[in-house]
Image (cartoon, helix red, strand yellow):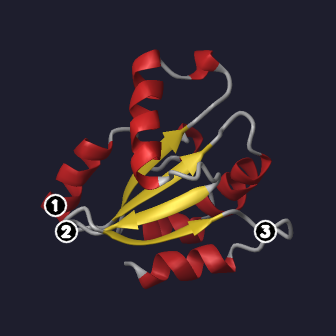
């Protein structure tokens, strides 16, 4: 997610500390960066859009990647990501966005991405929580 020029965190606990300090909700993005076609399209259409960049100023962003290629992440990061997936994405649905408030309580979640590449549901979901 580095190419999007946004400050994506890979550690939820660090993000929760920032969320409390800044009183901002947390957006957790679950992706399979090297195998999930809808994830790649959502990244391009939604996360890399100017409209999302504007909304991201009001969020603490976390990306939890679950790649098939083991060389894309360190073993430590992959193990960590699996623990976050077990807590917030038990069904292992990709892509998935989960919103947490600054106290760490889940506020909502949205899964999947339309084959028509319609981002309106995702923007509505984000807007409801910021």
Q: CA distance from mark 1 to mark 2?
A: 5 Å
Q: CA distance from mark 3 to mark 2?
A: 31 Å
Q: Is residue 41 above or below residue 55?
A: above
Picture quadrant of residue 120: bottom right
Q: Is residue 19 left or right of residue 96?
A: left
Residue at 43%, 26% in the rendered image: 79
Q: Is residue 22 left or right of residue 8?
A: left
Evaluate if marks 3 and 2 touch, with contact meaning CB atoms under 8 Å apart: no
Q: Position of residue 121 (x, y in %)?
A: 64, 79
Kindly identify which numbered label has been placed on residue 114. Answer: 3
Quickly name the residue at label 1: 20
Q: Position of residue 18 (x, y in %)?
A: 21, 53
Evaluate if marks 1 and 2 touch, with contact meaning CB atoms under 8 Å apart: yes
Classify mark 2: residues with Cα within 10 Å, few (<14), some (14-19) or many (20+).
Answer: some
* Extreme residue in the left direction: 21
Quickly name the residue at label 2: 23
Q: Position of residue 66 (x, y in %)?
A: 58, 35
Residue at 69%, 58% in the rendered image: 42
Classify mark 3: residues with Cα within 10 Å, few (<14), some (14-19) or many (20+).
Answer: few
Q: Position of residue 4 (x, y in %)?
A: 57, 48
Earlier residue among tags 3 and 2: 2
Q: CA distance from mark 1 to mark 3?
A: 33 Å
Quadrant of the drawing holding the N terminus = top right
């Amino acid at each position: 997610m580095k190419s999007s020029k946004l400050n994506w965190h890979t550690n939820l606990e660090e993000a929760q500390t920032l969320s409390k300090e800044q009183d901002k909700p947390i957006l957790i993005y679950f992706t399979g960066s090297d195998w999930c076609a809808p994830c790649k399209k959502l990244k391009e259409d939604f996360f890399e859009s100017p409209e999302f960049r504007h909304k991201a100023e009001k969020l603490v962003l976390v990306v939890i990647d679950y790649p098939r290629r083991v060389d894309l992440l360190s073993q430590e990061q992959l193990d960590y990501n699996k623990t976050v997936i077990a807590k917030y994405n038990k069904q292992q649905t990709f892509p998935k966005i989960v919103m947490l408030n600054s106290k760490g309580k889940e506020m909502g979640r949205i899964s999947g991405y339309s084959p028509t590449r319609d981002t309106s549901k995702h923007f509505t979901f984000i807007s409801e929580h910021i």
